[in-house]
Structure formats: C-alpha cells, structure tokens
Amino acid sequence: MKRTLLLLCFFGSFFYVRSQSYFGFRDDNYAGIQGVLFNPSAIVDSKYRADVTIASASITGQNDLYGVNLAEIFDGGYDLDTDAKKKFKSNNRGNFNVDILGPSFMLNITPQHSIGVFTRVRSITNLIDVNGQLIDEVNKDIDASNSFLISGGNPNGVSNSWAEIGASYGTILLDRDEHFIKGGITVKYLMAGVNGYINGNNLSVAFNKNDANPALSSYNSTGTLKTAASYDYENGKDPEFDMASAGIGFDLGFTYEYRTNCHTCIGNRYKFKAAAAVTDIGKLNYKNLTENTYDLTGNVTQEDIDNADDIFQFFDTYYTKTSSRKGVKANLPTALHTNFDWNINNKFYLNLSGDFGLVDAKKINGTAIANSVTFTPRYETRQFSFYVPVTWMEYSGTQIGTSFRAGPLFIGSGSLISNLFSNNSKGANVYVGLKLPIYQNYN
C-alpha cells in the first residue's frame, strides 16, 4: 500500500472526506418538507396545500487544519502539502456530511392538521483530537520526510451512514389574538448503512528515516487503538449496507409566532417567530459490527506498509489484538435547532438560526454535528426567494454564501461567496433540489 496507509492506521482517512444542510433555504416559509427536517412543526400552517419533493441533496465539509484556495483546486495542479495554509494543533478536527432527500411529500389535511412522509439517506463523518503535525509529516513523500517524534494523543473518528423513512404530523396548539403556537413530531424508521470508527489512546509515533534505503525507514509506535466496521473487513469484504440492522428515531419541535397582521392581509401574519426542535433522538443497532482493540507498541518499516494489501491484515500481522467484540449500537446525531425570524415587511426578513450538537464528539462511535450559528437576510415571495447566509461553523470559522428558490427549483451554497474570494477556505457547502409545489389560495 501507499505511504498514506499509516495515516489511516493511526488516525483514519475520515479527515479528508457530518451536520447541517440547506443553509438559508431551510428557514424560508416556502421551504416545505426541507424545513420539516429541522423542525417538524413547520409542516402545519404552511404556504403549501401540498409539497412534493422529487429529490434534493446537500453536501458539507470542513476542517481546521488545511486552508485552501478552492478555485485553484478546481483548476488542477493544487498540491495540498505545499500550497495549503496549515494550522497545526494537537486536537485538529474535521467533519463531512451528506444529506440526500428522495421522493417526499407534505399535505395540509385541514387548516389545523398536516402530515408528511419523506425518504432520506444520510452520512456523517467526523474526526477530532488528531495531531495536525503528525498528519502533515505522514502525508509527505518519503523522500521529503525527516525523522520525527510526535505524540498523537487520543484521536477519535467515526463514520456513520443510514437510510430513513419518516412520517411527520403537525397541529396548531394555540391561535389566540396575537399569539400562535404549533407543534410537530416525526417518527423515523432507520435502515442501517455502514458504520465504522477508530479511537486511539496515548498514541505516539517516531519515524527514523533511512537515507541510504528509504524502504527500510522505520516507524516506532506506542498506545492502543480501537477499530470497528459494520461489514466483514477482516475477510476482505467491501463496505455494504447492513440490511439485518435497523433502529427508530424521533424529532420533536415547536414554533411560536407573534402576530400583528390581520387574517386577510397578504403575506405572513407574524411579525416575529421563534422555534426550537430536538432532532435525531434514537439509535441504530449494528448487529454485525466487529470492534477490535490493538496494542500498537511495535516497529514497522516503509516496506512493510508498501507491501500490505489490506489495512486490517496489516494490523493483525504487525500488532497484538488485545480484545474483540461484536454488535454495537450507534447513536444518531441528536441536535438542538433554534430559529428566530423577524418579518421586517411582507417580503424582507432577518433570520438567526443555530444548530447545537447534543452528542459528545469524544464519545467512542459518537456521531455528532459541529455547532453552528447562521444569520440570513432573506427576500421572500411566493415564486422567488433569495438568501445570503452568514454562518459561523465550529470547525472552520465564518462562511458567507448565497442561494435562491425559483418556483420548483432551489440551489445554493452556505460558503460560495467566502470561497470565491478566500485562499484560506476551511469549509464548503452546496445544495440543490427540485419540488412540485401546490400553493395555498392566498399569497
């Protein structure tokens, strides 16, 4: 195998591949089922009699080690080792999130009750507490490397993917004068995908370069490492969905509106809206997941790494397996979502939303999101909306994006503007979707 195998052995390739999605658009009153994903109470008293989503997808990635120029990357010839700006810490972090919504719909049964059904595939990968200096050293070509001794600490990484079928229900709880409250709940059947994780304890690596024969350069390591995967990796099987494993999940949300507009006025009736929801309460039961613990005290050469065909065979050959177990439960990325929306007039809004992970990212096999806060000025009408989300992300800092909705199509990015003008981008986000909206009779 190539030299980067050592990186995978000790810290996982997860760093380079999550969390949040649909920045800006999800807070639109015309977001439909995409808004329900973050707060199920959004399903009732919506702008749609029915909303049918054909498909949508959002991808988000971030880290706090490498700052890059995305324009130069797309032009080709970009070298991460020499061109990227690096910020080494003993606890560098990274996160990657994919969120794909399949055929879905929501329907107002009556003015007070609404239902919805959605299909969704998700994948979240995160890595924390990794020594960035060691990442950088191991990633170098061996001819450019120098001897080093670095403590890797206690890196923790997890990758979890699954599919879900959700059923949502929302109802109006209070509608009295200026005060309006609605609530909603979503129940999700979870179909397990691929789950894997690593967890290191007191790791350290010493590299001794052999200038005369680089293949005999050696790596001396100490510490312990847990590795796990939900597929039969020990026998060379490729990752595949675990059809024998499943789970149940829940979302719960509420929305309060302070209303000053009359019932017959055009536009939204509220002047100010506040909402909160807790999503992804539940677990997946991976019956076939195998966890192995290795004592990494030992010595390997570059030749040993280059000649290895499989990472797990490499572990079994050169290190001592101290324990093994089968069957593990993986939590969902439980999170608190808050939303404050100010209706300046009938078309202009200011929105402040937050996503806060309720799962400790240091937990073994702990699927978690990165915390974020987004401020979004918004122009909104029935047929068209435009957003400029400004987001602070826990791992990558502040990002500025732009997006729009035009009838059935919505497309955008939470980081487009900042990525276009920065040579130190540490995060990127993009999303797109197509739906068939059936509007209410009023605007």
Image: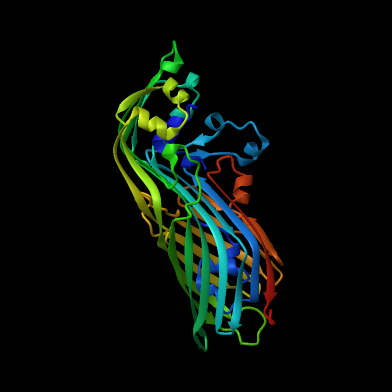
Q: Is residue 354 left or right of residue 33?
A: left
Residue 414 at least partly seen: no
Number of residue marks? 0
Residue 110, position in %: x, y? Answer: 59, 85
Q: Residue furthest bottom?
A: 177
Query: Which residue is at the front of the view, 218 or 31?
Result: 218
Q: Residue sitting at 48 percent across and 21 percent down? A: 142
The reply, left or right, for residue 225 in relation to residue 309 is left
Q: Is residue 285 above or below residue 236?
A: below
Return the residue nearer the eye: 212 or 116: 116
Which residue is drawn at the image coordinates 50% and 68% (left, top)? 339
Q: Is residue 268 above or below residue 423?
A: below
Residue 314 is situated, as x and y percent measured from the top left of the image, at 40, 30
Q: Is residue 61 visible?
A: yes
Which of the two residues, 127 or 109, is positioned nearer the viewer here? Answer: 109
Where on the picture, by quarter, is residue 283?
bottom left
Q: Which residue is rendered at x = 64% and y = 37% of the image?
A: 72
- The image's colour scheme reads rainbow
Q: Position of residue 79 (x, y in %)?
A: 58, 31
Residue 298 appears left or right of 246: left
| Quadrant into which the C terminus falls | bottom right
Question: Residue 273: x percent and y percent?
Answer: 52, 75
